[in-house]
């Protein structure tokens, strides 16, 4: 079984339930999984989430509160999240993310990385695909001066500041056997050519239609990209140093997205019942394998139509996640981390949904020429 332990000795921490971390039970791509046959296919969901906005809500459900001396377990069910059919039965190594963002004393959002250790465990044939995290003594909160080890968490410290701390990550090996994939009974309607709604009231329908039109207008990014042949301030800020192959990837993504925003079904109710998703702190989520359906959550309704972390931009973010549009991931959330990603890892930046969103939102506006 996969275990990570955490015990807090000093005052309690409020840990942000970021959907990329083991603290969230959402069906997101929390783990890296590898066997001799390769990695299983991810079949879960991808979501838009902004840690600073989630923390600002201050709601209990936003956090995992770790009191002094407390320990607990979180169980992750892998059915419906990973499909092991192509890689088959056998031994698998599981690892969790080890990248943490935090806001330091000056208020700046920063990223810390930690080393990774491996431990070997095996589970017998027929066991269900579950990962158990026992939170008790494993996180290295360097800002506190304590020495712990562990995985990725975001926390609110005693002063109320948002901190994202990375600690060491343990990797474990399991024997996988039994049913290797969960069935999905939903069939997308790829013939839709207009905005449609599920469970949305008239006011919501009007707001969505306005956002969808604005999102289509962001397709001007296609014309802009076609006009450049080298790095401009706008391009390099969000996608890093200019390289033809990466540029072609970005162009391909936006060409595929096109005007999908006004040919999509928007669901206003699913987010309230999706396992592990916090309605209040999430903007939206999609199943990447089901193009044409975007599930809207609480943060979407409080966002502006256009501008940073907007409704129109959220739609671009989610459309970029669909496999048919390029299948972007969520390597980084938020403007600061997305800009940092463009500088440090352009290859991941062109695969990051938020970088695509912030590129089209272009707020504050960056020069198209420099």
Image (cartoon, rainbow, N blue to C red):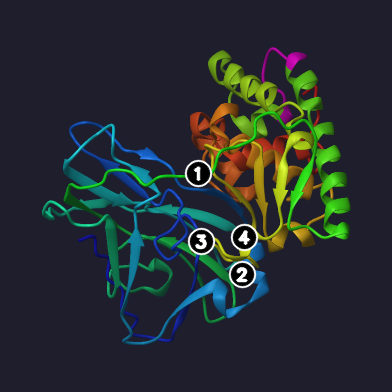
Give whichever of discs 2 and 4 has the lower sequence position: 2
Q: Which residue is mark 4?
A: 271
Query: Tag 4 or tag 1, which sits nearer the N-term?
Result: 4
Tell me where the magenta segment starts and ends, as one range. 226-234
Circle 2 is placed at which residue position? 55
Q: Earlier in the sequence, mark 3 or mark 4?
A: 3
The question of residue 228 being in magenta is answered with yes
Q: Is residue 53 above or below residue 116?
A: below
Residue 6 image offset from top left, x and y in percent: 31, 73
Q: Residues within 10 Å of mark 4 (few under 14, many from 20)?
A: many
Label 1 environment density (alpha carbons within 10 Å; few <14, some 14–19, many ≥20): some
In the depicted view, which residue is nearer to us: 302 or 116? 302
User: Which residue in the protein does label 1 denote?
Assistant: 331
Q: Give residue 281's quadrant in the image.
A: bottom right
User: For the residue labelled by badge 3, is the local secondary structure a helix, a strand or a loop?
Assistant: loop
Name the front one of labels 3 and 4. 4
């Amino acid at each position: 079984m996969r275990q990570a332990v955490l015990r807090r000795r000093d005052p309690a921490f409020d840990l942000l339930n970021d959907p990329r971390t083991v603290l969230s039970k959402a069906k997101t791509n929390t783990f890296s999984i590898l066997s001799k046959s390769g990695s299983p296919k991810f079949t879960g969901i991808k979501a838009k989430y902004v840690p600073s906005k989630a923390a600002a809500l201050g709601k209990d459900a936003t956090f995992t509160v770790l009191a002094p001396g407390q320990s607990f377990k979180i169980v992750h069910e892998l059915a419906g999240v990973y499909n092991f059919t192509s890689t088959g039965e056998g031994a698998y190594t599981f690892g969790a993310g080890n990248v943490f963002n935090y806001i330091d004393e000056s208020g700046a959002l920063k990223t810390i990385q930690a080393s990774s250790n491996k431990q070997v465990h095996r589970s017998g044939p027929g066991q269900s695909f579950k990962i158990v995290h026992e939170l008790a003594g494993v996180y290295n909160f360097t800002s506190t001066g304590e020495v712990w080890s562990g995985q990725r968490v975001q926390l609110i410290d005693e002063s109320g500041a948002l901190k994202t701390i990375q600690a060491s990550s343990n990797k474990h090996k399991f024997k996988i056997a039994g049913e290797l994939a969960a069935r999905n009974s939903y069939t997308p309607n790829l013939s839709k050519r207009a905005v449609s709604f599920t469970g949305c009231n008239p006011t919501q329908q009007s707001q969505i239609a306005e956002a969808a039109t604005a999102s289509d207008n962001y397709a001007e990014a296609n014309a802009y990209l076609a006009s450049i042949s080298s790095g401009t301030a706008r391009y390099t800020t969000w996608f890093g140093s200019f390289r033809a192959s990466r540029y072609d990837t970005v162009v391909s993504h936006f060409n595929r997205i096109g005007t999908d925003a006004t040919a999509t079904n928007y669901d206003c109710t699913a987010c309230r019942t999706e396992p592990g998703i916090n309605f209040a702190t999430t903007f939206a989520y999609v199943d990447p394998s089901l193009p044409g359906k975007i599930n809207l959550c609480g943060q979407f309704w409080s966002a502006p139509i256009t501008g940073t972390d907007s409704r129109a931009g959220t739609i671009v973010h989610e459309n970029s996640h669909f496999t048919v549009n390029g299948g972007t991931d969520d390597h980084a959330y938020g403007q600061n981390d997305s800009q940092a990603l463009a500088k440090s890892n352009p290859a991941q930046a062109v695969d990051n949904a938020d970088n695509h969103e912030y590129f089209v939102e272009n707020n504050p506006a960056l020069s198209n020429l420099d």
